[in-house]
Amino acid sequence: MKEFEVLRADSEWQRAGAYSVRIQGMNRQYHISLREEFDEHDGDQSKYIVLLDDGYPVATCRFYELDCEKVMIGRVVVLPEYRGQKLGTKVMQEAESWITDLGYKTARIESRIQAVDFYRKLGYSTVDGIKIQNGTFECIRMEKILKQQ
């Protein structure tokens, strides 16, 4: 399997890689406006994972604190031409590792209905089963208790 460089984005140029993937993978593919894709959780208060293929950003996610024990993971995106290579899993695993390193205990995600099985395979369970409208997508809230290292 090909090796991808994994970044825990801590500078603006690295965050730009995350934004690039989101623009290509969501904004263009699903016709989501930039205003909808980028919200109050983007910026310095969030953490970003970026996967690079020979320096080119191909997958990303972000997370931000909900409270002192819990974070919200979101904006998990893999470019269409890179899907099917388990990069979504790789991005999530790196995010969970970083979240654990930072001392949080629980990760929450609002999963698109179509992606629920993906997150279940990663150990997430539905919180309340209530469908919520998150922008363009219908979503289900899921959580995972993270193993502390």
Image (cartoon, grey):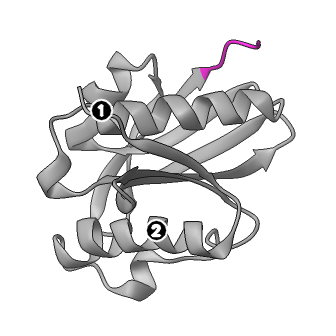
* Image position, residue 140 (x, y; %): 38, 41
* Image position, residue 83 (x, y; %): 17, 44
Residue 12's place in the image compared with 122, above or below, is: below
Quarter assignment of residue 146? top right
Q: What's under tag 1, amino acid-wise?
A: Val
**Which residue is located at x 41 percent, y 32 percent?**
90
**131 sits to left or right of 26:** right
**Which residue is located at x 25 percent, y 42 percent?**
113
Residue 142's place in the image compared with 31, above or below, is: above
* Image position, residue 73 (x, y; %): 55, 46
Residue 101 is at least partly visible in this image: yes
**140 sits to left or right of 49:** left
Q: What's under tag 2, amino acid-wise?
A: Gly
**Which residue is located at x 20 percent, y 34 percent?**
85
Q: Residue 14 colored magenta?
A: no
Measured in 3D between alpha carbons, the distance from the residue under mark 1 to the one under mark 2, in whole angstroms, is 26 Å
Residue 51's place in the image compared with 102, above or below, is: below
Quarter assignment of residue 79? bottom left
Q: Which residue is mark 1?
A: 116
The stretch of residues the image draws in magenta is 145-149
**Which residue is located at x 45 percent, y 44 percent?**
5
Q: Earlier in the sequence, mark 1 or mark 2?
A: 2
Report the quarter where the C terminus lies.
top right
Q: Which mark is residue 17?
A: 2
Label 1: element kind: helix
Tally the numbered discs: 2
